[in-house]
Amino acid sequence: MNVDALIAYVTTTPLTWIIITISVYKIGIILYEKTGKHSLLQPIVIAYLIILPILLLAKIPYQQYFASVSILHFFLGPATVALALPLYKNLKLIRSYFVPIMVTLFVGGTFTILSALGILWVLGASKVTMLSMTTKSVTAPITLITAHDIGAIPSLAMGFVVITGLLGASFGTFIFKILRIKHDEAKGFALGLVSHAVGIARAIEIGDNAAAFAALAMGLCGVFTAILLPIIIGFL
Amino acid sequence: MLRGILTLLLFQFIGECFVKLFELKIPGAIIGMVLLLLFLGVRKGSFHALDTSVFWLLRYLPLFIIPAAAGIITQVDTISKEALAILTSLVIGTFLALAFSAKLIDILISRKENR
């Protein structure tokens, strides 16, 4: 028996961290389904809560972890391209509600970014935090590929995305009730626009119309933020 | 399935090439996504292999996010220093954004229906 060789293999092979990462996500899915798909117990949140302590305890440098699991990261690119299909399928909704959708997309989307930045600015946050906040309402893959281009920190931006998703899913129904929002389409659109995929999960619980509008809002918000944000920030 | 994966990779590749060639500041995958959207529009629909690949990729999307998301462990300093600003911005910002967007589109839809 050669224990040293075993330890050397286990600590250097990418397989170790790939297996841990996939397992953690699988645990997330199992717990999510066990709790009846509670919209706040998204698999990604559970996976986060397990993997972060493991990484800290293992004292593995982040670069080394990332290099080990970079094969998983690779799929973000094709997955972003894949978002075209659900967007295409929901795009027919635009025809009947063109003006409400486009106005809310641009005015609501801009308001979302500026209100968050305003609060950060008043409370004296750093520039990099503010840049990382600009993509908080965008779906995660688009956040990650955009954050790098605009000088934000992708992982920080990603943290903001996850928290924004959870907050939107928790506040949503309460806000809609006090503001007396009448249309399910409006509820869905706002949820998808502000809280991306977690918002869609919440909208599915409201109904089919809400879910479709949430998916449409997330897709449009992602595309327009990714295209306009780098251009606007390039001018500043 | 393979034709679907190939389609996605090709569109991403074309998008990235487009960005390099025209020195755009937009992520290449987004250009690839918009091009695929146009392609689906021209073709008037998807095909089985693409449907299958997209279903598979989007189903496991959160898994592909974990490697980059875990980088938050390198940001502990920034977060603890600016915790109050970040939390306030996230909580109040999300609250305001949801209220504003929902009310705006609700009014616009009502107006359209009353016409």
Image (cartoon, grey):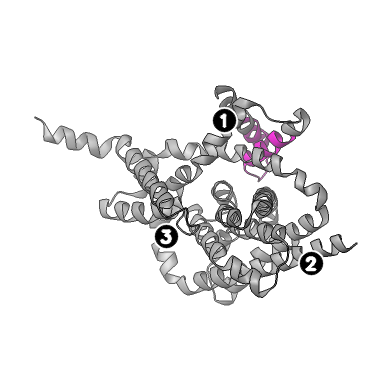
Residue B33, magenta (yes or no): yes
Residues B36 and A26: in front is A26
Frontmost of labels 2 and 3 is 2
Spot the residue most to the left.
A1
Disc 2 to disc 3, C-alpha distance: 41 Å
Residue with the mark numbered 1 = B52
Q: Upstream in the sequence, badge 1 or badge 2?
A: 1
Q: Are marks 2 and 3 in contact (CB under 8 Å)?
A: no
Frontmost of labels 1 and 3 is 1
Where's residue A32, x and y in %?
A: 43, 52
Residue span colored magenta? B13-38
Q: Who's the residue at 48% across and 58% down the image?
A: A159
Residue with the mark numbered 2 = B107
Return the chain for callout 3. B
User: Please, is residue A76 above or below residue A36 in the view?
Assistant: above
Give left or right: position of A200 versus B102. left
**Labels 1 and 2 within one chain:** yes
**Labels 2 and 3 within one chain:** yes
Return the chain for callout 2. B
Q: Who's the residue at 50% across and 55% down the image?
A: A158
Q: Is residue B51 visible?
A: yes
Disc 1 to disc 2, C-alpha distance: 39 Å
Spot the residue most to the right.
B115
Secondary structure, mark 3, is: loop
Q: Main secondary structure of the magenta part?
A: helix
Residue with the mark numbered 3 = B75
Secondary structure, mark 1, is: helix
Q: Which residue type carries mark 3?
A: Gln
Return the chain for callout 1. B
Q: Which residue type carries mark 1?
A: Thr
Quadrant of the frame with the C terminus of chain A: bottom right
